[in-house]
Image (tube, grey):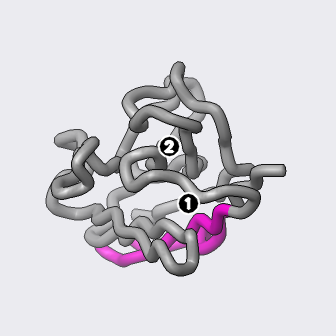
Amino acid sequence: QVQLVESGGGLAQAGGSLTLSCAASGRTFSSCAMGWFRQAPGKERELVAAFTWSARSTYYPDSVKGRFTISRDNAKNTMYLQMNSLKPEDSAVYYCAARSVACISDALHVDYWGQGTQVTVSS
């Protein structure tokens, strides 16, 4: 049984940092098959970090580029999201996601979701 378990969410002040972790169990995923999404109340779930198919580069939307960093520890089958210079608009539930075969691209094409972890950034 595949499980994705996130940890590391919580409350941070604007300008602060948080690091999220996602531990995968039940199978291993290719480098680009895992990514991070977030969903704020009343908004669609959006992709905030992913590896490209070659895993030699990464994707970030403009809203988080330069502030968020995705990384993986393949030995631990764990993915991370380092979030710096946090803003109140970063407040959302953050989800770890994975696909069985292809690379992460959008919320419609995800085979596995974590339970989500709340990130709240106060101003």
Relative image position of residue 119 (x, y in whole percent): 55, 60
The residue beneath circle 2 is 38
Q: Secondary structure at mark 2?
A: strand
Relative image position of residue 20 (x, y in whole percent): 52, 69
The residues tagged by marks 2 and 1 sit, at their Cα atoms, a distance apart of 9 Å
The residue beneath circle 1 is 119
Q: Which mark is residue 62?
A: none
* Frontmost residue, 7 versus 9: 7
Q: Amino acid at mark 1?
A: Val
The magenta span reads 6-24
Q: Is residue 104 left or right of residue 15?
A: right
Q: Is residue 83 left or right of residue 3?
A: left
Residue that appears at 54% across and 47% down:
92
Residue 58 seen anywhere in this rendered image of the structure: yes
Going from N to C along the chain, the mark reached first, 2 or 1, is 2
Q: Are marks 2 and 1 in contact (CB under 8 Å)?
A: yes
Residue most extreme to the top: 108
Queried whether the magenta region covers residue 7, the answer comes back as: yes
Queried whether the magenta region covers residue 33, the answer comes back as: no
Relative image position of residue 98 (x, y in whole percent): 56, 43
Residue that appears at 39% across and 63% down:
123
Residue that appears at 34% across and 63% down:
70
Residue 36 seen anywhere in this rendered image of the structure: no
Q: Amino acid at mark 2?
A: Arg
Query: Which numbered mark, 2 or 1, is in the foreground of this view?
Result: 2
